[in-house]
Image: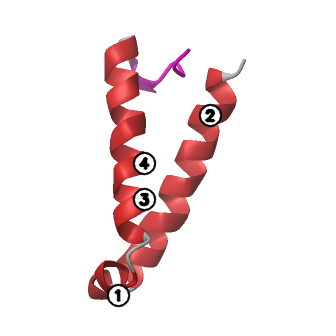
Amino acid sequence: MEATITIDGHTLTVGQSMSVRVTITAFLMELNDKEFAESLGQIGIHYHARLTEVLRLIHEESVR
């Protein structure tokens, strides 16, 4: 079951929520590439931290 994601009052469909989860996961995988992450500088560190938090929330919601 996918997490329920609401953006600005609009609840995403299951397919849209899945797309968000997969996109975040894919970008986090890219951020694990040291060369890529270093090319982003400090923002790469912040992206990684925030997206990890969001993915954790998505997984917590999907198991409820």
Residue ID for mark 4: 25
Q: Quadrant of residue 34?
A: bottom left
Mark 2 burial class by Cα count in 10 Å: few <14, some 14-19, many 20+: some
Q: x, y percentage for residue 9?
A: 40, 18
> Is residue 57 depicted above or below 42 in this figure?
above
Could you tell me how far apart the alpha carbons at marks 2 and 3 are, in whole angstroms?
15 Å
Q: x, y percentage for residue 29?
A: 41, 60
The amino acid beneath tag 1 is Glu
Residue ID for mark 3: 28
Label annotation for residue 53: none
Mark 4 burial class by Cα count in 10 Å: few <14, some 14-19, many 20+: some
Magenta-colored segment: predominant secondary structure: loop
Q: Quadrant of residue 42?
A: bottom left
Quadrant for the N terminus, please.
top right
Could you tell me how far apart the alpha carbons at marks 1 and 4 are, in whole angstroms?
19 Å
Label 2: which secondary element: helix
Could you tell me how far apart the alpha carbons at marks 3 and 4 are, in whole angstroms?
5 Å
The amino acid beneath tag 4 is Thr
Residue ID for mark 1: 38
The amino acid beneath tag 2 is His
Q: Give the residue displayed 42% in from the left and 36% down from the top.
A: 21
Do the numbered discs 3 and 4 sit on residues whose CB atoms are within 8 Å? yes
Residue ID for mark 2: 59
Label 4: which secondary element: helix
| In the foreground, 31 or 57 | 31
Mark 2 or 4, nearer chain start:
4
Mark 3 burial class by Cα count in 10 Å: few <14, some 14-19, many 20+: some
